[in-house]
Image (cartoon, rainbow, N blue to C red):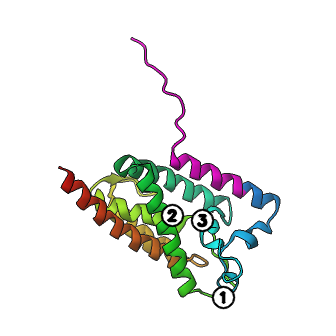
Amino acid sequence: MYKSYRGFNLTPVWVLITINFLLFIATLIDYRLIFLLGLQPAAFHDMPWTIVTNLFIHAGIGHIIANMITLYFFGSFLSRLIGGRSFLIVYFLGGILGNICYLLLPPSPLAIAVGASGAIFALGGTLAVMVPRLRVFVFPIPAPLPLWVAVIGGFFIISFLPQVAWQAHLGGLVFGLIAGLFFRQRQHRSF
């Protein structure tokens, strides 16, 4: 019996991860890209594209690795549940709403927000509503947790660390929870 090889499938999740890593490398080559693509409340009027571009810029290797690992697991699972197009809608609308919350409640008008965390919290919030009892492992906890506990607990632990844009996390999470209710109701109606 032979096992067939399906090959690599370029999903929306892999496209996002690739873009994030390419732009991370670009910011290592020219750090000024952070100022051009990061979201700064004081400069938003002159640079409105940053409400989206900051989702692809990260502050360091730990930041991008943590976000991309989480994006891979949450994104892969969610895109199988709701489809690639709906996954992208949740990702980008959650990230943009997170950025709007950051603009409304900035720690400083000169602070620059970077990272995909708001969009990733949108994915986590959607999954927390759709499959709340799914058991997941969260490093370094040695026992599996219900997904909703991991997502909400992660929000409170990560969001209140210094120099973290908790506003973006909150906006993304709230959007994700609402999106999760929408997709869960749609799933129930289809049965």
Whether residues under marks 2 and 3 lie with C-beta atoms below 8 angstroms apart, the answer is yes
Q: Is residue 7 magenta?
A: yes
Q: Which residues are magenta?
A: 1-24
Provide residue 31's location: percent of width, then percent of height. 79, 66
Q: Residue at x 60, y 87 (%)?
A: 107
User: Which residue in the protein does label 2 denote?
Assistant: 92
Tag nearer the camera, 2 or 3:
2
Tag nearer the camera, 1 or 2:
2
Mark 2 belongs to which amino acid?
Answer: Phe
Q: Between marks 1 and 2, how big is the CA–CA gap?
A: 23 Å
Q: Front-most of 149 and 113?
A: 113
> Closer to the N terminus: mark 1 or mark 2?
2
User: Which residue in the protein does label 3 denote?
Assistant: 55
Q: Front-most of 76 and 162?
A: 76
Decide if residue 111 is in sight here: yes
Q: Secondary structure at mark 2?
A: helix
Q: Residue at x 82, y 62 (%)?
A: 30
Mark 3 belongs to which amino acid?
Answer: Leu
Provide residue 86's location: percent of width, then percent of height. 41, 56
| Quadrant of res 149 | bottom left
Decide if residue 132 is in sight here: no
